Image (spheres, rainbow, N blue to C red):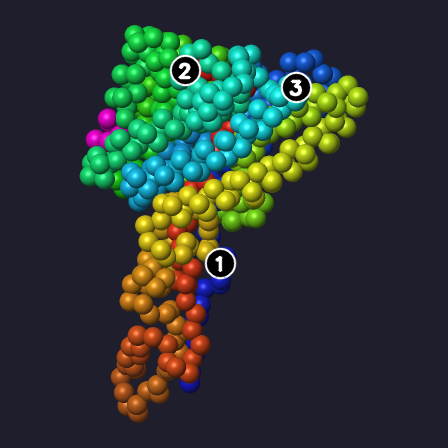
Amino acid sequence: MVALVEQPPAVPEKTRIVFIDIGRGLGALLVFYSHIAHPWVIAKGENAPYITFIEALTSNPMHMSGQGIGQIAVPFFFLVSGFVVTPIALRQGQARFALNRFVRVYAPMLFVVLLTALLLVADLHPPSTGQSQELTPLTVLTNTTLVNYLIYPQIVLVPVAWTMIVEIIFYLLLMAVLPLLRRWVWLAIAAELAFIFTVMMTRSQFGPSYSLFGVNVSYLPVMIIGQVIWATTSKKIPLWTGALYGAVAWSLYVLADIIDVGRIDNAYNLSMAFAVLCFLMGLFAEPKLKQRKFWTVVSERSYSIYLLHMLVSFVLLQLLRPLLPLPWALLIVIPAVFGVVEVSYRFVERPSHTLARKLSHRSKAAPNPVSSETTVEIPRVDGRGYPAPRPGPGGRGHDEQPTAIIPAVVAPRPPGADPRFRPPAPRWRSAPPDLPYHSDQENHGQRGDHDDLPSHGSSFRTPR
């Protein structure tokens, strides 16, 4: 008698960290909504009862009526950066990481700055922070490289880009502590926290440009919390150390509010606390979450949504209002925004990802076809709850053998044999030639690439 070993039901393969996809997608959409609701509808006194209703259920009870519920997205994206980008830097090394980040961040940024400059020349009034939008070759260069946020007086062409300079500073800090991070994670994080505290305490000592630098550094504690979550969950540091570092990072972020480092309302601490709660809930729910195409698509385009939504929507709304009622204008504006986002993603952002991988790839091997990004691997488990074997060089297990459907041959019991007798199990290392096999290791790639970060939500106003 021959019986096949019962196999667990097939589970769709995850190629991405799902809760990060969902968080990034929701964050981008919330920021889009908040920038329509607050700097346009509310600030201009538009009659929009549906916006009033949504605000009554979201921003108002969360004490975020100044900037909107999208304010939660800013710290969430910073948490994602600390959690995701840290292992990427460890894997790539300083030179490859710097080259990869440079291409990914600045190619879409250049596109948006040039589009903004074109709209300024055409006198179509792109959105402004109220600061100077003087258009010269130098200001185009400084806005593209984001150093305009470190130069006083500021000239800001793209209002939402202030979170990007925070990302760049984090990348530079991460590269500086990378040698420590490879050997002593606890010491590297301690050095980062000491750096943040020192800059915040000396922000008024070296002129207005250094003060702007201090404002941007004051947002780094959120990224350090994301980094601490990565270090704790990946067993790089003990839980008590992670809790201590998390408390210190939280204290530094609150301290920035107490000493008034670039904060424009009192909702920053609450929005950060809520973002951390959502992040931890997503992290613990990850094993139960299923990968959905919608969230993958929105997440992959979240950087383009972030950079372009305000520019496109405000210019179009100025052209359409008051010729059309606001609801009809929005029915035109929203699809137009996502149309421009799709163009940016297909012809600027995605090609920049491909170029970044080619330039920073260590070998000439083709990139993993399962996902266009690379980040941290979440260990999988088999149907019995045991850790699945990690892939070897050929994409299968370390022994390079396929996982086969092995027939269990039940031999008849010899006459008079002990009833407890069991025949020895077959010890085949691989499937016999005449049997089909399947391998659950063929696509055992790394989970969730999400290496197209940064992509952020943002508040409307630039920190000062």
Q: CA distance from mark 2 to mark 1?
A: 52 Å
Q: Earlier in the sequence, mark 3 or mark 2?
A: 3
**Region rendered in magenta:** 187-191
Q: Is residue 81 left or right of residue 416?
A: right
Q: Which quadrant of the structure image shows residue 64?
A: top right
> Is mark 1 in CB contact (under 8 Å) with mark 3?
no
Quarter of the picture holding the C terminus: top left
User: Mark 3, residues whose alpha carbon is within 10 Å: few (<14), some, or many (≥20)?
Assistant: few
Q: Nearer the viewer, mark 3 or mark 2?
A: 3
Q: Earlier in the sequence, mark 1 or mark 3?
A: 1
- In this figure, which residue is indicated by the disc labeled 1? 11
Q: CA distance from mark 3 to mark 2?
A: 26 Å
Q: Which mark is residue 151?
A: 2
**Position above or below: 98 against 213:** below
- In this figure, which residue is indicated by the disc labeled 3? 123
The residue at 30%/92% (across/down) is 415
For mark 1, give the secondary structure.
Answer: loop
Residue 331 is inside the magenta segment? no
Looking at the image, the residue that sits furthest to the bottom is 415
Residue 190 is inside the magenta segment? yes
Q: Which quadrant of the structure image shows residue 126?
A: top right
**Position above or below: 283 against 172:** below
**Position above or below: 412 against 64:** below
